[in-house]
Image (cartoon, rainbow, N blue to C red):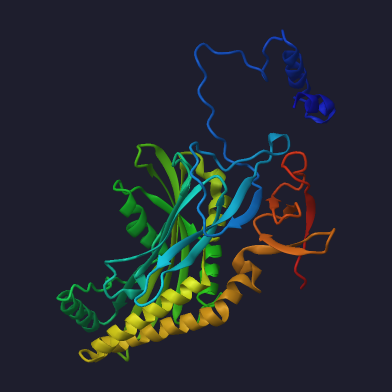
Amino acid sequence: MLACLKEHRDQVSPACPQAVTSMLQGSAGGAAPTAAQPAAASGPPAPPSPAPPQAPVTTVAPSAEGKHPATSSAAKQPTGRGSGGASRYFELKRFTTTTKVTAPNEADRVLKVYSLLAPAEWNLVGGASSNPDTGSCFSDLIQVNGVVKTGDDAYGMVIVPQATFRYADDPAIRQQMEQRDRFDARYKLKGCPIVAPMHAADFVRNNVVWKFHEDKPPVTSEPFPELEQLVRAQLGLGRQGDGSTRVEAVRVRTSTTSSKGAAVDEWWSAVVVVRTVPGGGRGTGYDWHAEQITGFQAPSGKLDGYDKLYRVMATSIRLDPQFISSTTAMINKLYGTWAAEVRKQNAIVAAFQQHVIETIQGVTANQQRGSMVAAYGADQLVRGVQTFRDPSTGRTVELSNLYDHAWASGTDQYIVTDDPNFNPNGHVDGAWGELKLVRPQP
């Protein structure tokens, strides 16, 4: 480092030559401390606090499918080296979770559940489990969950299972829903909560943040358009929806105390999907869900430096198509069986449930026909990516659109950065070639 400083001392700012000279003299021994080399204070110095990354660069490693990373005994923050110490980067990998599926008269199967991007040194535990309290909310029968974090729990993200609700404008229909719930309760079948649809920010504050933190800290919120567009695509709705479905995504920020008593800052995000159900002249019914619920935690004062990392992680969660197909088929069957029984007893509630079933089946068909194309195919804006070309080979690749400069090593590993002057060669192992951003033609 000193040799580099000496070689480039004529390129530093006017205030730096004296400090560089002092450092060089100090390295030879005998130089008195200067402003760039402070004298030791009486008593041991405080340990340095980790600085958040300033110009994050992302290295995407090949996925380790079906495996969890080994637990690290020491926490490693997702920061890296950079040119002259000014640039930092995240080294990311795609983790994949699995679950075992047991069915009558069938051999056990292991299904991939979801994958996500996270810092390579972090640890992921999660997958899917059955919900014993689902009752007649069959869409919540399978809970997708997980925690990915550093070894000391200082940094991390949690994935919270979705929640389902129902409501009707007409008090008479709500009364019949309640009567049906009381009837089902005799057979220990709990009904879905009857709650009026709410904005995503209100849901996150009331049902997530205040659920996890008894001190009920204040929150501030902002839209999360990247997540909203992604969920629309996954549901086969496109960016504008179909007129009967409202999709709203939000990020909520709060400051509170962790379970270990440490001051922490948090980002929470969720998507609220509200489907309207015609009431036949008796008002409107609503089948609504809170989905893609995640929370990111960092030590107090460090959260801003991890803003892009959280956005990348929260929008990188991908449910496996086979998992979606298997679980949706099972849930549809349960809804159909239950609705057939309800139809015998209450035509109004049965009609509501039948519309829910048709909506779910339509969404499933859209997912099978087109949502994967929408989520991973033509619309790069929805997926948060853009195209880069390797000048040496002509090969193109899609990388995050949060960064406009990218490099490739030729081994399916990439670095993306905000800094147009950053060159990973000599700072990151491997031989890196710069990629050219391909701008879309009008």
- Provide residue 291's location: percent of width, then percent of height: 42, 66
Q: Quadrant of residue 201?
A: bottom left
| Residue found farthest to the top | 30
- Provide residue 365's location: percent of width, then percent of height: 50, 83
Q: Is residue 105 above or below residue 205?
A: below
Q: Residue at x 84, y 27 (%)?
A: 7
Left or right: 410 as drawn, with respect to 262: right
Left or right: 89 as drawn, with respect to 167: right
Foreground residue, 207 or 412?
Answer: 412
Q: Residue at x 48, y 58 (%)?
A: 222
Q: Residue at x 22, y 74 (%)?
A: 189
Q: Residue at x 52, y 19 (%)?
A: 45
Q: Quadrant of the N terminus?
A: top right
Q: Is residue 322 above or below residue 348?
A: above
Residue 291 visible somewhere in the drawing = no
Q: Quadrant of the C terminus?
A: bottom right
Left or right: 341 as drawn, with respect to 400: left
Question: How many discs appear?
Answer: 0
Q: Is residue 400 above or below residue 325?
A: above
| Residue found farthest to the left | 186
Foreground residue, 437 or 90?
Answer: 90
Left or right: 163 as drawn, with respect to 187: right
Q: Quadrant of residue 33?
A: top right
- Provide residue 408's location: percent of width, then percent of height: 75, 53
Residue 357 visible somewhere in the drawing = yes
- Provide residue 123's location: percent of width, then percent of height: 49, 48
